[in-house]
Amino acid sequence: MYSSAHVASMLIGALVILLLSILSSVMTRKEMARHTYPVAVLGMGILALVFLNVLFPSQYASLMHAMGWVKHGVGMEVIERCIQ
């Protein structure tokens, strides 16, 4: 009924919510400026993408393609096949 991807995405979502909550609590305790939270979240997102690219390059490529950030057309496929 559920695949391992469903379970993994649910666990990752729960982990992200927990991490954002901890980040908010720490920043509130340290009385940091309110505008630093979005900057910290953006930085964490960029770091997550870098780690994903390093650790799991095929999943990173799949994610970028699904988001439409990387245009992978027929011309690029031809170049890749010529290089191999």
Image: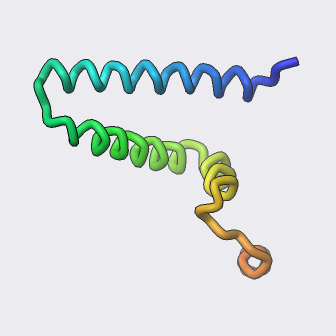
Looking at the image, is 15 positioned above or below residue 41? above
Residue at the image position 36 percent from the left and 20 percent from the top:
21
- The percent coordinates of residue 35 (x first, y second) are 22, 42
Q: Is residue 17 left or right of residue 5?
A: left
Looking at the image, is 10 positioned above or below residue 62? above
Considering the image in quadrants, where does the C terminus appear?
Answer: bottom right
Q: Residue 61 occupies which quadrant of the picture?
A: bottom right
Q: Can you name the residue that lies furthest to the front here?
A: 34
Residue at the image position 31 percent from the left and 41 percent from the top:
38
Residue at the image position 48 percent from the left and 47 percent from the top:
49
Q: Can you name the residue that lies furthest to the right here?
A: 1
Q: Residue 7 occupies which quadrant of the picture?
A: top right
Looking at the image, is 1 positioned above or below residue 35? above
Which color scheme did the rendering employ for the protein?
Answer: rainbow
Please state which of residues 71 and 53 is positioned toward the viewer in this rendering.
Answer: 71
Q: Is residue 80 left or right of residue 2?
A: left
- The percent coordinates of residue 59 (x first, y second) are 65, 46
Considering the image in quadrants, where does the N terminus appear?
Answer: top right
Q: Is residue 22 left or right of residue 36?
A: right
- The percent coordinates of residue 34 (x first, y second) are 20, 36
Q: Residue 74 occupies which quadrant of the picture?
A: bottom right
Q: Total number of numbered labels? A: 0
Please state which of residues 58 and 71 is positioned toward the viewer in this rendering.
Answer: 71
Residue at the image position 53 percent from the left and 50 percent from the top:
53
- The percent coordinates of residue 78 (x first, y second) are 79, 79
